[in-house]
Amino acid sequence: MNFTDFFTFSSLRSRVVGIATILAVLIISAVWFAQLFVSNASKTRSVGLEERNTSSQLNRQIRDDMWEVEYALQLYMLSPSVALQKTVQEKLRHAITTSIELQQMQWIKLTYLDDQVKQLGGHLNNVSNKINRLMEVRQNAELMYPGLKIARNKLLPSYDQFMSAVSLAIEELEEDNEEGNHELQRLFYETQKSWQQMIATFRISLVARFAALITGGIKPLEDTVEIHYQHTKSLISKLKQAQEADRLGLQAADSVIAMEKISEQWFIDYHKLQNIHNIKFWRSDVPIMKDVIQPVLVEIQSLLKGIDTHMEQIAVNDVSTLADVSDTLIKILWALGSVFLLFIGLSYISFERRLLSPIEMVAKGLRDEASGNQPAQLPPASITEIQYLTDAFHEMQQQVHIRQDELEHQAMHDALTQLPNRTLLHDRMHHDIETARRNNTPLSLIMIDLNRFKEINDTLGHHTGDKLLQMIGSRLSSLLRASDTVARLGGDEFAILLPNMGSDDVMHSAAKIIREIEKVYDVDRKSLYIGASLGIASFPEHGDTADILMQHADVAMYIAKRTNTGISLYDYDKDEHSISNLSLTSDLRAAIDDGSLYLKYQPQYSLKTRSIVGVEALLRWDHPGRGPVPPEAIIPIAEKSGVIKQLSIWVLNKSLQQLEQWQENEINLSLAVNMSTWDLVNPELIDRLKQLLNFWNIPPDLLTLEFTESGIMSDPKKVLDILIQLSDMGISIAIDDYGTGFSSLAHLKKLPISYIKIDKSFVMNMAEDDNNAVIVRSAIDMAHNLGFTVVAEGVETETSLKLLDILGCDIVQGYYMSRPLTASDIGGLTGSRNTILRVI
């Protein structure tokens, strides 16, 4: 609006401004008058304001300190640490110091708050002493867990006493060497074994109680202890009968009496420990926290809130003195409101004629724009405001087009990560493929699937999973060039499009990507680790269209995930749906009969005797056209085509035949054979095994069948029957690749298993990765406690071998000792008494 419009009143704004100027003068005058009232009232209440604000700040500081004390104390109860203890004590000292400073404020004494503040200081000193006592208890295991003293001083020493009594009896029976002593020795040995099983189960239940190793509770373990005790008791009863029949010597008779007394006293003490564990506060730190400290903390918060309330009330009283001023202001506002109503009435008459009718035309134009029709041309504006409205209409048109562009962006991008989605990726692939074809340049596509993401998402929730996906998307974007495209295809699957990059260069980029993904993620104060499987397909060698490239990259990704290699470049031969692999399936059926299949044997060494104790049979295939076919490609083809049953029987037959030849040459070795999960549901397996063992005259205890951990645990109830039948035949059962699945030794102990084979992915990197070393050590300790023999495969360095020896591993195999050998080489190896004494 220019000055001419204002003085001629050619616009509604100029008219409104004129009236508004008059009203503004009235309002300014009213505000000035009210300011005089407020200023006088404020002067009367300004005395003591600074001290009141200081006191309020000190009170809030105490409250903040106590909130931090409570939070750190709760964390300390979960996981005591020196840092948390220091935090609690520092915050308490600061709160006590602040309360003393608050007591010394003159304003506190004038407002009669000094009694409450003194009471607050007493509570703070009291709770400080109580918390120190709690920390003393929390740091002392025997003070914290009353039952630990019984377990340490009574229950566990009984184990050595009982074992000593049994050993003395067995020694006497062995020295006498009389007829009938073998049966008594067997009875003593069985009693000793039952006692050891009871004590082992008790120790596991004790660890589960104090360290929470078993999430399902310890009731099944306690029931097992009861069963073992009753069995031990029945065995001792049989020994007493032998004693009463005067079949035992003097020492053995005394041992039976001691064993009965020790076991009965042990069970009495065990029930005492159970009674302690069954009470509500079996941990002494919980009642201190709940019944002693928590009420004082509540009282402190209550006092702080009361002091705050009192201070607020004083502030309210100060404000009440301004109420008279408010009444005056209200009267002025009513007067001004009446004038404004009159102004609005007069303005409406003018607006009806000069403004509303043009606005209706603009509204019609808006409806036309909303329906997608071309809006009619708006007439020239008669007043300035209508011209502004017309300009706003045109600006709105521009904003609508901008919003449409935003909607198109949303349709082409992932809502969570803001990365391009599958649709946009597909469009860019079409464009980049045409460009690459025109310029004769390469192009690569990487498909990424995250490992263990579902486990994190299910455990920590979708909120954490979403944050993790956003962080991964950000990391991937930071690695790319301006011409590259990273997209989220849905779930935990991403894709990266790399123009001008062929299959030779993309592997380097893929390795860089996987290293970046595997770095630690800090999400909600949790350190998370995640892996990835990458599949790569390149234009033009792996496909010349977007659909084919995506399909082949997807195939490569699943091969990388299945083989646990991390990165896989598309291989036509490994594509299960390719014509070549369909032909390979047919060739495998013929290879079982034509001799192109054969076995090699990798030695297994005992770390106790430092010598070879067995071998593992490994399948090999020399394809007449393709050359050697790796085992990881043979087994999936056999399983999917149904050839696995014939293949497994062929491997068993060849292995047992070789065992028979070694037996003839006085080479005594055990032999392990890898079996497929499909063999566990083969009803013919048991009968065929019996036939083969009888035919080759092989003792069953020389044969070990290895099944993968994931295969057995996929349906443990279903496979339990066939495993029991195999075990009853005398065949040993081994769990292969232990640690790569989701089972626990607590579950596996229910199965008739003799060996646990730790997966080579943990063994190969245990010297460099402390986490892998901890996993290997835990697996060895738990397996030994449950009576399993531990085999470590993938031993490729001297450092790994020495470390396994220190950790107590039983058997090792790997390239450091020997690569897979032929049967004749194995014979020479045992004939020369080759050992591994030279390296450990």
Image (spheres, rainbow, N blue to C red):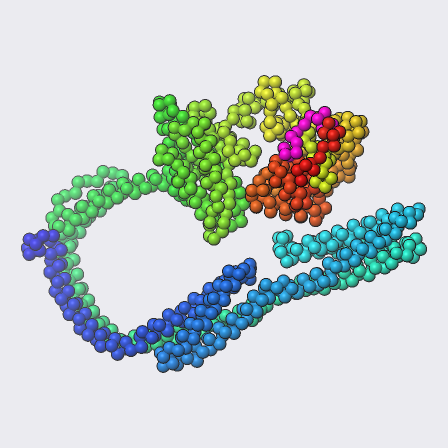
Residue at 93% x, 46% y is: 179
User: Which quadrant of the view contains residue 111?
Assistant: bottom left
Rendered location of residue 26, percent (x, y): 14, 68
User: Which quadrant of the view contains residue 773?
Assistant: top right
Residue 420 shown left or right of residue 790 in the figure = left
Quarter of the image containing the C terminus?
Answer: top right
793, above or below 583, in the image: below
Q: Which residues are drawn in magenta?
A: 814-827
- 816 inside magenta stretch: yes
252, above or below 715, in the image: below
Residue at 41% x, 44% y is: 416
Residue 395 shown left or right of residue 625 in the figure = left
Compare residues 277 and 794 and report the one nearer the observer: 794
Rendered location of residue 352, percent (x, y): 16, 54
Compare residues 529 and 218 and report the one nearer the observer: 529
**So how many labels did they put on this image?**
0
Residue 726 shown left or right of residue 630 in the figure = right
Residue at 15% x, 64% y is: 24
Rendered location of residue 266, percent (x, y): 76, 60
